[in-house]
Image (spheres, helix red, strand yellow):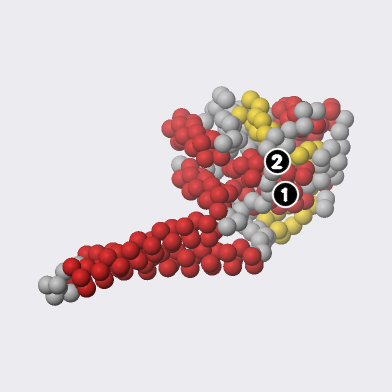
């Protein structure tokens, strides 16, 4: 198998046939063995019937249907688990990604030996206020945090070596940060390619402005996991130590002051230093406890699937 094309979708009944015909025509022209995985993420329209029809005509197309809408990360995760092609290409189902990009995305992996090739929608046909400007801010923050010099982290069309997608684990909304996950796993040969972005032909976007807030929160999570995911005690323990030492020093000061300096008989509980010492020592202990619990959970964790498949076609 040379190419696996993974297409997560939700309520895209009007674009599926046109999209798959274009992909098949292009890959047939390259004379390569291929598979197309259509991951129906709990669509409520006629998408699954369209997928069933397409799979009945072309045995190289495989359909996977989720019990409900679990999210794009889970759809991609299911596709990554099932795909077999030497090069894995992901793209959206709304016809805004151009299948004519497939040959160059494929050859950048095969001939130039990149691990990940990310699309860059340099010219976008999206809302300026709700997508373009937030996207620029989001990508700037992702570059600063990850150190990866990409202009468009969240572009749907990308290509990967098979071993890359088999290694990374997608949870939550981490599909936005697959290049970061790949780098953290040791696959740092990452580049980007300017891709054509078409206006949406059918339906409407499934994402609102809230996705950027979620994206920033996921970015902070990813940064924390990368820095301290294997040693949570290094983060929580450091803060806990600083706070415990602070509380301990205030306690010593209060004791010395009470015994040798302040002989007026004023109660220690009447002094603000007492509450600083008490608060910092309690919070410091809690941080230590969080670090220990994090270490225990890390050593016993088992990542479970975050999606349920109800049907498959051409398995």
User: Which residue is rendered at x = 54% and y = 43% of the image?
Assistant: 206
| Left or right position of 244 against 194 | left
Q: Which residue is mark 2?
A: 187
Q: Which residue is mark 1?
A: 167
User: Which residue is rendered at x = 37% and y = 69% of the image?
Assistant: 282
| Left or right position of 28 against 63 | right
User: Which residue is rendered at x = 61% and y = 63% of the image?
Assistant: 298
Q: Which mark is residue 18?
A: none
Q: Position of residue 231 (x, y in %)?
A: 57, 57
Choose mark 1 or mark 2, whichever is in front: 2
Which is nearer the N-term, disc 1 or disc 2? 1
| Left or right position of 24 against 258 | right
Q: Contact, CB < 8 Å: mark 1 with mark 2?
A: yes
Please determine whether, in this image, residue 99 is positioned above or below residue 88.
Answer: above
Label 1, label 2: how far apart the Cα atoms are: 10 Å
Question: Label 1's element?
Answer: helix
Question: Label 2's element?
Answer: loop
């Amino acid at each position: 198998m040379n190419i696996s094309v993974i297409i997560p979708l939700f309520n895209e009944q009007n674009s599926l046939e046109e999209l798959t015909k274009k992909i098949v025509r292009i890959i047939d022209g390259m004379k390569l063995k291929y598979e197309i995985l259509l991951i129906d993420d709990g669509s409520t329209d006629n998408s699954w019937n369209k997928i069933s029809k397409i799979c009945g005509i072309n045995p190289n197309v495989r359909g996977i249907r989720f019990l409900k809408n679990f999210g794009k990360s889970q759809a991609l995760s299911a596709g990554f688990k099932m795909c077999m092609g030497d090069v894995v290409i992901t793209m959206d189902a709304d016809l805004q990604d151009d299948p004519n990009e497939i040959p160059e995305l494929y050859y950048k992996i095969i001939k130039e030996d990149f691990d990940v090739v990310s699309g860059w929608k340099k010219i976008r046909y999206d809302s300026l206020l709700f997508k373009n400007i937030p996207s620029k801010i989001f990508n700037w923050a992702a570059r600063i945090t990850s150190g990866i010099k990409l202009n468009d982290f969240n572009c749907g069309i990308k290509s990967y070596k098979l071993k890359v997608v088999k290694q990374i684990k997608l949870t939550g909304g981490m599909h936005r940060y697959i290049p970061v996950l790949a780098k953290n796993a040791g696959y740092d040969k990452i580049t980007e390619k300017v891709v054509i972005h078409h206006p949406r032909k059918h339906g409407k976007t499934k994402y609102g402005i809230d996705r950027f807030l979620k994206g920033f929160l996921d970015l902070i999570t990813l940064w924390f996991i990368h820095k301290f995911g294997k040693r949570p005690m290094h983060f929580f323990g450091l803060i806990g130590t600083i706070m415990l030492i602070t509380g301990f020093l205030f306690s010593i000061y209060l004791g010395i002051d009470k015994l040798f300096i302040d002989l007026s008989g004023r109660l220690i509980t009447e002094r603000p230093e007492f509450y600083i010492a008490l608060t910092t020592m309690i919070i410091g202990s809690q941080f230590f406890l969080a670090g220990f619990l994090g270490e225990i959970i890390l050593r016993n964790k088992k990542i479970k699937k975050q999606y349920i498949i109800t049907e498959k076609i051409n398995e």
